Image (cartoon, grey):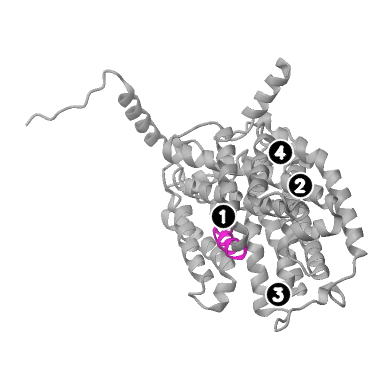
């Protein structure tokens, strides 16, 4: 590798801005490039799986209605969060520092990282299932280690490398997708009738079946809305308005609308919920190649976002600050461990629990920006991420997150009745929004940022502490 190439890669590595907002001069990516990176999320065949599972368990029409709901809600949340990120140059981890406090925001960083690592494991197992279906002689554990590790080098040089990977792989993805649809259409269906009319025995349109489908959608909706911020912060200032809408809605339309709908169709037609199995059944070795492509596209973004979140958490709480590469490796290793532990066996429960945490967090961010700051004029307009200017804890964000997550989880476990069990995520989001406004009004924005006098006192104390001539006075009795 030449000196120029090495220097270029080092510059790309530095441009991740894990701990700081992206400077205005570095916000130089067009809306198409940023949307293309987030499109890596939308092309994951995990959406095939959720569509197939929902259709086969709760009926195709309930799955379709829940997909429409997901597009609207996640699209709105994603647009608002992308806009806030593009304006501030920060991702949701950094934006949360002011509303949660710089230690309080570590809770969100850890939640965020754990979700990405978990989804990396889900996606990885789909890939492993596909390869194992075609090459059954290869042990599952070996496939897990190989495909769990391959995302590490693909993630090494950050945002620019992701952009290049997603751009060249997208046309190949569409070629494979069209081929799979054509071949599947010529395979005799396991269900007599139109796929959207499929309904398991004892299930009806609406009611509990629909609520359970919506509950499954919630598990990924919060993630797809929040992840936009990791990339929207690089958006050119002139592209912010159009770009926020594109980043917010296009991936949602494709992942819940196109991929989800295809998952429903495949699941009903082939009577199989695991795309790692039915894609290989449809296209053979080509299905293995397609699955490999889609899962690598999504898992490089999963590991990228997980590494940023872990960096923020350990830097804030433990002042442990290795570079992002360290956390890329850690994220991949934990994901491999989850795959070896059989994470797919807990898909439904994991998605419901994640939905409660992520939707509560997204609701707090959006409510804080649109209601507390803009409508009620409480707190500073500009986001601040520098620790010296922030409190460790801000009850406006921390209290709603903890209370709504705990109560939402209790509801999700069925201790508050059947209705709240099936709407636990929605309940948690509404509760989080209400508490955010109530606590902001009560505290009058006191804990968003330190006053200049407090900052001066803190700096003086730190200077005295570091001074070699500083000694502690011993009182004379």
Compare marks 2 and 3 and give the one earlier in the sequence.
3
- Taking the view exactly as shown, the residue that stands out farthest to the front is 137
Reply yes or no: does residue 364 show up in magenta. yes
Q: Mark 2 highlights which residue?
A: 292
Chain part drawn in magenta: 347-365
The N terminus: image quadrant: top right
The secondary structure making up most of the magenta span is: helix
For this view, does 7 lie left or right of residue 269? left
* Nearer the observer, 206 or 88: 206
Query: Which is closer to the viewer, label 1 or label 2?
Result: 1
Circles 3 and 4: CB atoms closer than 8 Å: no
| Cα–Cα span, label 3 and label 4 | 40 Å
SS label for mark 2:
helix
Examine the rendering and report whether any part of residue 30 can be seen.
no
| Cα–Cα span, label 4 and label 2 | 29 Å
Mark 3 neighbour class, 10 Å CA radius: few under 14, some 14 to 19, many 20 or more: many
| Cα–Cα span, label 1 and label 4 | 39 Å
Q: Mark 1 highlights which residue?
A: 341
Compare marks 1 and 4 and give the one earlier in the sequence.
4
Examine the rendering and report whether any part of residue 477 can be seen.
yes
Instruction: Quadrant for residue 216, please give it.
Output: bottom right
Q: Can you give x and y, in whole percent of width and height, for residue 273 in the image?
A: 73, 65
Circles 1 and 3: CB atoms closer than 8 Å: no
For this view, does 467 lie left or right of residue 144? left
Query: Which is closer to the viewer, label 2 or label 3?
Result: 2
Q: Can you give x and y, in whole percent of width and height, for residue 324 in the image?
A: 57, 34
Query: Which is closer to the viewer, label 4 or label 2?
Result: 2
Q: Mark 4 highlights which residue?
A: 235
Compare marks 1 and 3 and give the one earlier in the sequence.
3
The C terminus: image quadrant: top left
| Cα–Cα span, label 1 and label 2 | 21 Å
């Amino acid at each position: 590798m030449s000196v120029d190439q090495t220097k270029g890669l080092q510059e790309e590595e530095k441009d991740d801005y894990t701990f700081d907002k992206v400077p205005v001069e570095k916000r130089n990516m067009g809306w198409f490039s940023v949307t293309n990176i987030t499109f890596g999320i939308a092309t994951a065949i995990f959406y095939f799986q959720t569509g197939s599972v929902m259709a086969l368990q709760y009926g195709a029409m309930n799955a379709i209605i829940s997909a429409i709901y997901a597009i609207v809600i996640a699209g709105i949340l994603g647009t608002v969060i992308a806009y806030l990120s593009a304006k501030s140059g920060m991702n949701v981890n950094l934006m949360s520092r002011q509303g949660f406090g710089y230690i309080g925001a570590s809770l969100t960083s850890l939640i965020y990282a754990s979700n990405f690592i978990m989804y990396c494991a889900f996606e990885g197992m789909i890939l492993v299932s596909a390869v194992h279906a075609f090459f059954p002689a290869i042990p599952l554990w070996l496939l897990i280690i190989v495909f769990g590790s391959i995302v590490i080098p693909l993630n090494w040089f950050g945002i620019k490398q992701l952009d290049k990977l997603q751009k060249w792989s997208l046309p190949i993805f569409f070629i494979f997708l069209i081929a799979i649809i054509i071949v599947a259409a010529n395979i005799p269906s396991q269900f007599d009738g139109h796929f959207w009319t499929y309904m398991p025995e004892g299930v009806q349109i609406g009611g509990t079946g629909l609520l359970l489908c919506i509950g499954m959608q919630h598990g990924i909706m919060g993630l797809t809305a929040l992840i936009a911020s990791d990339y929207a912060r690089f958006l050119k200032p002139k592209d912010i308005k159009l770009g926020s809408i594109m980043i917010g809605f296009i991936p949602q339309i494709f992942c819940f609308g196109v991929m989800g709908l295809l998952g429903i169709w495949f699941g009903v037609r082939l009577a199989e919920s695991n795309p790692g199995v039915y894609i290989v059944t449809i296209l053979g070795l080509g299905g293995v190649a397609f699955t490999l492509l889609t899962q690598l596209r999504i898992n490089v973004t999963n590991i990228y976002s997980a590494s940023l979140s872990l960096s923020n958490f350990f830097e804030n709480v433990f002042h442990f600050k290795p570079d992002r590469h360290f956390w890329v490796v850690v994220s991949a290793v934990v994901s491999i461990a989850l795959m070896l532990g059989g994470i797919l066996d807990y898909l439904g429960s994991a998605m419901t629990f994640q939905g409660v945490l992520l939707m509560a967090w997204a609701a707090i961010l959006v409510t804080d920006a649109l209601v507390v700051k803009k409508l009620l004029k409480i707190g500073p307009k500009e986001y601040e991420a520098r620790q010296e200017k922030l409190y460790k804890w801000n009850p406006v964000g921390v209290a709603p997150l903890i209370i709504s997550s705990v109560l939402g989880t209790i509801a999700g476990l069925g201790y508050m009745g059947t209705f709240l069990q099936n709407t636990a995520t929605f309940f948690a989001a509404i509760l989080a929004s209400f508490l955010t406004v109530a606590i902001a009004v009560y505290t009058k924005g006191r804990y968003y940022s330190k006053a200049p006098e407090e900052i001066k006192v803190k700096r003086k104390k730190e200077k005295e502490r570091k001074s070699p001539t500083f000694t502690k006075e011993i009182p004379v009795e």
